[in-house]
Every structure is written in structure tokens, then in C-alpha cells.
Amino acid sequence: MTTNKDDKTQIIQKGNKSDQPATPEKASGKSGQRDSNTPADDSTIIVGSQNTGADNGKDNPDVTVVNLNARTIPPASSASSPQPKAAASAAAENRRVIKGRFELVSMLGAGGMGAVYKALDRRKVEASDSDPYVAVKLLNDDFRQHPDAFISLQRESRKSQTLAHPNIVTVYDFDRDRDTVFMTMEFLEGSPLDELLRKHPDGMEAEKAESILRDISNALIYAHSHNIIHSDFKPGNIYVTNKKGTKVFDFGIARAVSEGSAANTAGEKTIFDASTLGALTPAYASKEMLDGSEPSQSDDVYALGCVAYELYCGKHPFNKMPADQAFKKGLKPKRLKSLSRRQWNALAAALEFTRENRTATVAEFYEKFFGKPRVLIWALATSLIAFAVVGGVYLKNYNEQAEAQEKLKEELQLELQTKLESSAIDNQENALDRLMQISALTPKWDAEVRRELRKYNELVPDDGTMNEKITRQTAKAYVDEARRRIENDELKGVTPLLQAALRWDAPTDTVNLLSEQLNTKQEAERLRQENARLAVEREKAERMRIEQEQREADLERARQQQVKQEVDRLEDSLRCPNDIDVAGRVADHLHLLESLDPDRSAALRTAVASSLTQCFNKIAKISPYSAASMLEESKALLPDQSSLDKLKVDYCGHIAPGTGAKGRRYTCADPLPDGAKGPSMVVVPSPQEGKAIAISEYEITYDDIADFCRVTERCDASQYANNFLPLNNINIDFANNFADWLSSVTGQHYRLPEYDEWLLAAKADGAPESADRNCFLKYGAIEKGTQLRKTTIGRPNSYGLVSHVGNVQEWAYRGSQLVVAGGSRQTPMDECRINTVKPHNGSPDEFTGFRLVRETIR
């Protein structure tokens, strides 16, 4: 790749060799990273053999991309001859066709707005047109996705179609093909000006530069006369053709003059700023454009000045620096020696940063730069010479001739000045007369009248006649227009006309009379509109009442149907499986029913609570944990139902008595706070027929009371946790306090067993005591009962009790008497029996422990 950093041209040689037309997305540079050689402002990237060359324009929305790898454009001779239909059909197989009409042949270039293609117009081919080609511009994503782009650009395109001028590219149409927005224009052969300027880094030849400047100035003057401002004027939007002179294009996105245009009065004020869509080039935009001010012809004057400067020297006057930055830095353009003083002064005035100092119009710049024919001056100069020659015949000597010539020169200069002043006065009078004839009566026209009248007063300060005449005519024009509108009931805009008439000293009585007429008509119109509005409102209200009654009837029928459906669904959700979803399905259907029928809410809640109670009682016999979860959700759903408060979960109530030896599934434990659990229990028959009780599976251990110690601080929990030896050396009060604490935190009734309860659980099915019981035995080398062992050691009886004989003797009550049963590790083996029992005073000793029982809910 070769790079020329001066003119920012890049040529990339390798890559894809496809001859397919590049899509607009590729042309606009959607990928790739900008490098140090990325062209700035109005520069051009020339792509050789790969489409990714367009990526170099990614960071510059106004870069023009020219694809040299596209299908070769036929030379002028072949381009002017019609393409055979068969050949066109064959070529079209691989070409994109827009709107079923325009075959994209090759990409000519791309920029901020999109990509431009040479296209074959099939209708011209069918008509055997000698020049079947047009230029098609496909607008990029920014334009297509802009909410107002299509409407606004279509409107601006219509304005461009009215610009029939030899120095403006003809726009044929603006249309959409599904997601593709495109413009069709005349196809030209030649070169864009930015490309020519890069080939002439020191500027164009003076004659060529002047020709181009005249053409583009005439184009802008013509556009401005149609109230269209280009707003993106730059070398890239100027095309120097081979045979048709220089042409300006991209007026299709220009902003219309906001005041005084026919479009504005028709309600077609442009509703978006072209600069927001990439149609503003900072290097050529005026300071006011960059500041977001309203568009003005002066904006195009600044851009024209920049282009003119480049035409004569090849360089931008401020080195492509935006006007607002150059203004802050106080930059001044370097004087071009190739221009005359008059031309330089005209160019310098066009390059002023502020509108106040800048030349106002292109026409004014054109006059200052190229000048007017000075026929009068040359005629007077010729007369001066003639008089001098003739006078020489009659004067007697050289001194007399010189004196006469000087006097004659002064007289001629005075005569010249008088004629020039008279001509200027005539011009001002003509300008005022033209304005009076136009009588546009717009703010812009009003300001123009005052400006021209002020200029006239500067020329003829003592002439009050013209002032009086123009003031009278202007006031009359405003008054007449206001009167006409009032008579024709065109009341909109009359008040500003009357206000303007007063500013031009119209008779106060006349204006007041018209104001009264206006107010009367406005009030009558207001009353008419109000009555019409009220009639419409009454009709609308009656129609809405009928519709509302119908809707309410329909809604009531739908509500009743929905209530019935929801009742069925609620009943279905209350069926009693183990996993009944109270917080989900039941709650959803209940709440929906309450919203549909609020009056039945209380009855609904009572019925649901009754169903949940029945379901709870069923589930509690199968899965107490499921029952507990269901009860918690039920209370949260129905906090006002006292029947739910009476329900309690018995975590042992579902176990059949006497099944504890079958495994862990047949044991139970009440949950304690913080995720802890109470002592492991088995369910055994009660001495009272038909009832059952739960009794500790093992003797109460140190680990069992660890949570009690932590909460009550009556013992050291840290020493007891994970100690599974039977608890001993405590008094009877400690055991009762532990039972009371368990009762308070579980809601169940824990206590020491009655002796007959203990004996029934220990005997179970009447099997003899286990041979491995921990009682005292010393036989030769065999010695047992010397120390306590873990409560889990030993075989359970058929009810599931473990270590109920030996180890520690266990407290029980026989009536009101405290006894110990089952013997201990010091009880001789032959006396260590299930029915071993003796009184105890409840004092602490190392051989006594206890089990607990609690009642069950059946």
C-alpha cells in the first residue's frame, strides 16, 4: 500500500477480486480500525482490489470512497450507445436491481450519505435510449433509520427537482425499495473537484479556476433564489464534467430557508437538521452551522470562500480546521498573491467567521469578486483624452494646456461622481419599487424593505418624500391584506399583519377598527366551533354510554363465567395430595376470586380454611413436615382464620406404636429453633388402652441438652455438644426443667415417664434382657460395668428402645414416688433386669439418668 500524506489519498492493491457491485454497507465502512493515515474532512479513499478499503472512512462520515475494483465503466463512446437487451439480461443475473428497474453496474463513490452507483435504467433500454445510464445514490443506515429522514429528504428532493440549472446536477426521483432509500440523478462523466485539487496541490490554472468558480457561484445564486441552501457545499459535492461545465450536487439533503419559502407557508418546514445525518462537513461548515443556528445563505458563502481559496492555491484557508476552532484561535487566511486586491478583498470577506462581517449572499460575493463592466468610467476616460487633445490645439503654451487639462479632469471627476451617485440612488429606488411590487408581507420581506430604505436614506439623507411614500405603501399593504383576510374569513395570521401595520405608522383608527372586526369574527368562529364541539361531544357521550352499558353487560357475563371457572380451579387446587400448593395455586385462585367477587371474600376464606384443615389432618398422618409447611402457608394466606391457629403438627403422630425397631423412618424428633432437633423418639403403646406415647429412643445424653444449655445458660453447652454418653450427676429439677423447656419451644408436652409407661416400653414383646447390657460383672478376666458407654451401643428391643437396662438407672414416677428403673452399670448382672426398680430421692449421682416421654396427637 502506498500513502501520500499530503493529499490524503490511499491506494490498496490486494484482496478480493470480485466484480460484484459493493453494497452500501461495505461502502460506508462498517468495520476496520482507523489508522494514522485516515483521511480527514473532504478527502477521498481510492480502493484497489479489496472492499475493506472503504473502512478507512469509518471515522469520517464525509469521506468519499471510490472503488476501483468495481465493474469497469465503459468509455464515453460505449456509454452513449444502448446496451443490447440480451447482454443486459445476462449481466443482470449477478447485479442488484432496485425497484425492478435500476441495475447497479458499478460503484462510483461513497460518502457520509451513502454510496453512488452507475446504473442501467431498464426503461431507457426498452425505449432504445442512446444514453441508458443514470446515477443511483443508496442512502446509508443513518438516513434509513432516522424517524423523519424519508419524508424530509423526499420533500427536499422535490425542491431539488425544481432546480433546473446547467450548473446543478439534475435529480430525477427519490424513492424507497423496501428498506432501501435511494435517489436517481443524471449520470455525468468527469471528475469530482476534490480529486482534481489533489492532482493540483498548488491550485488550478487561473483560467480554469475562474471558470469553475463562476459555474458554482451561479449554481448557488440560482438555488438561493429558490430559497434552498446547500448546507454541505464542499469540493466533494462539485463535479467538473468533460463537456458540460461544472455542476453542484447533493442539494437533495439541503436545508430549506426557514423564512419566506413557499414550503414554509405550506406547512412543510424541514423537521430535522441535515447535519444530524452526516450532511455537514466541519471543514466547510460556517461557525453558525456548527453552533446549530438557523440556516442562512451566508453559510454557503463561507463554504464557497473555502472552495475558491483551494481553487487558486490548492490548500484550505484554515488547513481544514472547523470554523469555530479557527475563530477561537484567531486564524486569518494567508493572502493569495495571484489575486487582485479587489478579488482578495471579496474572498476575505466571504471567509469571515461571523455573519455580521461575512458577505451576506453569493450574488454579492460574485459582484465583488468578478466586478461589473466599467463602461461609464472607460467612456469618461476616453472623453478626457479627447478633450485634452482638442484643447491642446487652442492653448498657446504647455502650461496653459496643463492647467486646462487639470481643470477638465476635475470637472469630469465631479461629473463622474455625480452620475455614480445618481445611478446608486436609481438602483435603490428600483430596489424599493420591486419590494413594493412583491409585497410578500413576511418578516424577511419586512426586514429587507427597512434595510433598503436605510440604504436609500444614507444616499439621500434629506429626502423625506421616499420615506413617507414607502412607509405609506407598506402600511397600506399590511392593512389591505389584513382587511382581505378578515372579509374572506382567513383569520389566521391577521394579528401579526396588524401589528406590522402599526410599526409602519398605519392609522390607529383603521387598525383598531380591523382589530374589532377580527375579534368579532374570531369570537363568532370560537362560538361556532364550541357549539360544534359540544354537539360532537354530546353525540359521542351518548354513543359511549350505550357502548359502556353493552361492555358492562358483556363484562358481567364474562365475570360470572370466570368466577365459575375459578371456583372449579380453586376446588381442584384444594384437592389433598401431599404436595398441595397453598402459597401458589390455592392463593392465586383465591385472590382472583376475591377480585372478581369481593362480596363473597369472607365466605370464600372460611370455606378454604375448612378445606385446608381437613387436608392438614390427612397429611399430618402421613408426612408431618409437609403438614407443617402447608400449615405455615395456610396461616400466611388466611391470617384471619382462627380455626387454623388450633392446628398443631405432631412429628410423631404419623408413626404406628411399637414400630421403632424397623429403622430410622419409624423414629421421630421435634424441630427446635435454629434448625436443631429434640431427642430421638419412638412411639410405643400407652398403658391407657387406645392411646400411644413417644419415648426417648436413647437415654438423654449430654449432646441432647446442649441447645438447652446454650439458651438457658444453666450449663456449659461447649462441653456437652457431641458427647453421646448418658447425662448423669444431675438432680431431678434439672431433668424437669429440660422437659419444660422442650415443651415450651415445641408446643408439645414433655415429661418424665410414669413407671408403668416405662415398664411397658422396656418389656416390649416380652423378650429377655440383652446379654450385652452394661451391668456389673467380674468373672475371671471378664469385667463389665466399669464405665459408662455411649447410649447408641446395644441392641434395641422390638419397640426400638436402646440401653434401657444397665448403663444408668432411669428416673420414673410411681404415683407420686420417684423411682429408678432398669439398674445401672454397678448393678450386678443377675440383678440387672427390666423389672429392677427402687426408690430415689432425686439427688445427683453418677449412676442415674433419665428418658423423656411426650404425648402424641392422634
Image (cartoon, rainbow, N blue to C red):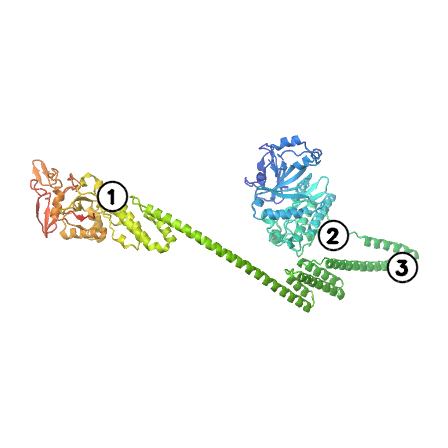
Q: Which mark is residue 424?
A: none
Q: Nearer the viewer, residue 657 or 160?
A: 657
Q: Amino acid at mark 1?
A: Ile
Please give left or right for residue 592 compared with residue 810 in the image.
right
Q: Earlier in the sequence, mark 3 or mark 1?
A: 3
Task: Residue under label 1, please give it.
Answer: 622
Name the secondary structure under disc 1.
Answer: loop
Tell us which disc is closer to us: 2 or 3: 2
Q: Kindly report the distance in space between the C-alpha atoms of the residues bearing marks 1 and 2.
A: 107 Å
Q: Earlier in the sequence, mark 1 or mark 2?
A: 2
User: Is residue 807 in view?
Assistant: no
Q: Quadrant of residue 408?
A: bottom right
User: Is residue 392 in view?
Assistant: yes
Task: Residue under label 2, please give it.
Answer: 367
Q: Nearer the viewer, residue 30 or 752?
A: 752
Q: Amino acid at mark 2?
A: Glu
Question: x, y (%) of residue 625?
Answer: 26, 45
Question: x, y (%) of residue 788?
Answer: 14, 43
Q: Nearer the viewer, residue 538 or 673?
A: 538
Q: Kindly report the distance in space between the C-alpha atoms of the residues bearing marks 2 and 3.
A: 42 Å
Q: Which mark is residue 400?
A: 3
Q: Is residue 64 above or below residue 489?
A: above
Q: Are marks 2 and 3 in contact (CB under 8 Å)?
A: no
